[in-house]
Amino acid sequence: MKALVMAGHLIRRLNQMSTHVFSTRIQEAGFDVTPVQFAALDAILSYPGIDQAGVAAAIAYDRATIGGVIDRLEQKGYVSRQVSPRDRRAREVRATEAGRAAFEEILPIVTALQEELLAELDAGEREAFLRLARKAIGPAMALPPQPD
């Protein structure tokens, strides 16, 4: 098969593996959070008062569908939204205490599963893989400015 040596195919397979391992470990811990919801909550905690568009930019997610992700986090009681006093068109997002607590419980699980994802690589290979993946992504890894 020619696809087995193509970067796109290998990246897709790694994404499938990552999503499966993430979902399994998070469900085993009693949480109902997707990888995108976890990333959004991380951005919201990192940038208190960030708006929805900023969350989308921070996690490289589609602006048109980030609202649904934040809706689900809000339904779970992990975040709250309010109209921005600086721009009435924007909605600021902040983590709730429940969101902070859930994130603190989930983070060690997600950190540990990183080892599982790259179990076939030794420490040097993992470091090289992560460095090369960040390089391949390039400027898309840039973080948004923090809100005032």
Image: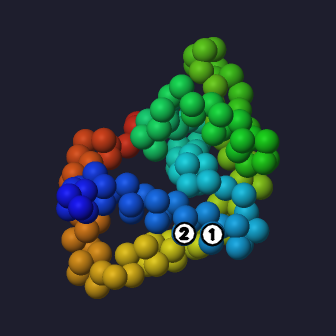
Q: Which residue is mark 2?
A: 21
At a point 20% along the width and 58% down the height, the residue shown is: 2
Q: Residue at x 63, y 31 (%)?
A: 67
Q: Which residue is labeled 1 in the image?
A: 24
The kind of residue on which mark 1 rests is Thr
Which image quadrant is residue 139 in?
top left
The spot of residue 21 in percent (x, y) is 54, 69
Q: Amino acid at mark 2?
A: Val
Circle 2: element type: helix
| Real-space Cα separation, disc 1 to disc 2, in angstroms | 5 Å
Residue 11 rendering spot, x and y as whole percentages: 33, 57
- The residue closer to the viewer here, 70 or 20, is 20
Q: Are marks 1 and 2 in contact (CB under 8 Å)?
A: yes
Q: Secondary structure at mark 1?
A: helix
Residue 134 in view: no
Identify the image's colour scheme: rainbow, by chain, secondary structure or one colour. rainbow
Name the spot of residue 128 as percent of width and height, x first: 22, 71
Q: Position of residue 137 (x, y in %)?
A: 27, 48
Q: Nearer the viewer, residue 34 or 3?
A: 3
Q: Residues within 10 Å of mark 2 (few under 14, many from 20)?
A: some
Q: Is residue 52 above or below residue 12?
A: above
The answer to whether 17 appears left or right of 137 in the picture is: right
Left or right of 73: which side holds 135? left
